[in-house]
Amino acid sequence: MRWEQIDWNGGTIYVRRVKKGTSSVQPLSGLEIRALRQLQRDYPASPYIFQSSRLSPLAHDTIAGIVERAGKLAGLPFPIHAHMLRHGTGYYLANRGIDTRTIQSYLGHKNIQHTVRYTELASTKFQGLWDD
């Protein structure tokens, strides 16, 4: 990701999907904007938001290692990988009652069947069904 993908005034970031997904503009929270501003101050010479010590974009293996180490430090009893963050987001949104189309758009899925699995397994999907 590059700094030019951030709209500082609008508080958004353009997420370009590299596989077959749909690119989109995502909102940034105030906390995220402050953290990104700090990164930009710390590393003003690089066009990349997340970079190596050589000011090049982080390699896939580097990111995988960071996520794996974070899982171990958190004491998780199973190995984790970066894509689990994406799955976790889908399940979290589904459990909050967010509709399937919104989750599909947020995750950049072209095929809604990739999104349906999150809502099918949502623990809250039947809550309130019979409330008067």
Image (spheres, grey):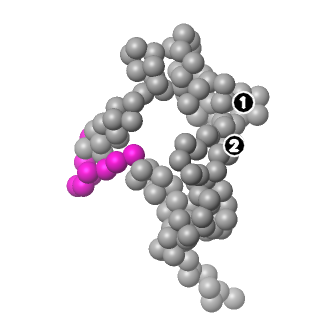
Residue situated in front as seen by the camera: 53 or 130: 53
Which residues are the magenta region? 73-82
Let me know if residue 121 is in the magenta part: no
Residue lying farthest to the front in this orientation = 20
Q: What residue type is disc 1 on?
A: Asp
User: Residue 121, image x and y in percent?
Assistant: 47, 74
Q: Residues within 10 Å of mark 1 (few under 14, many from 20)?
A: some
Q: Residue at x 62, y 59 (%)?
A: 110
Q: In this view, does 44 lie above or below 20?
A: above
The residue indicated by pointer 1 is 7
Q: Residue 102 carries which label?
A: none
Total marks shown come to: 2
Query: In percent of the image, x 45 and y 15: which residue is there?
Result: 55
Q: Between marks 2 and 1, how big is the CA–CA gap? A: 10 Å
* 122 on left or right of 75: right
Q: Pointers 2 and 1 in contact (CB under 8 A)?
A: yes
Q: In this view of the protein, which residue sits in the foreground, 78 or 2?
A: 2
Nearer-N-terminus badge (2/1): 1
Task: Give SS at disc 1.
Answer: strand
Residue 67 visible in rendering: yes
Characterize the magenta stretch by its predominant secondary structure: loop
Depicted 118 relative to depicted 78: above or below: below
Q: Residue at x 52, y 59 (%)?
A: 90
* Residue 131 in the image, given as x and y percentages of width and height: 65, 86
Disc 2 target residue: 25
Residue 96 appearing in the image? no
Amino acid type at image mark 2: Val
* Left or right, 6 with reference to 55: right
Q: In this view, does 31 lie above or below 127?
A: above
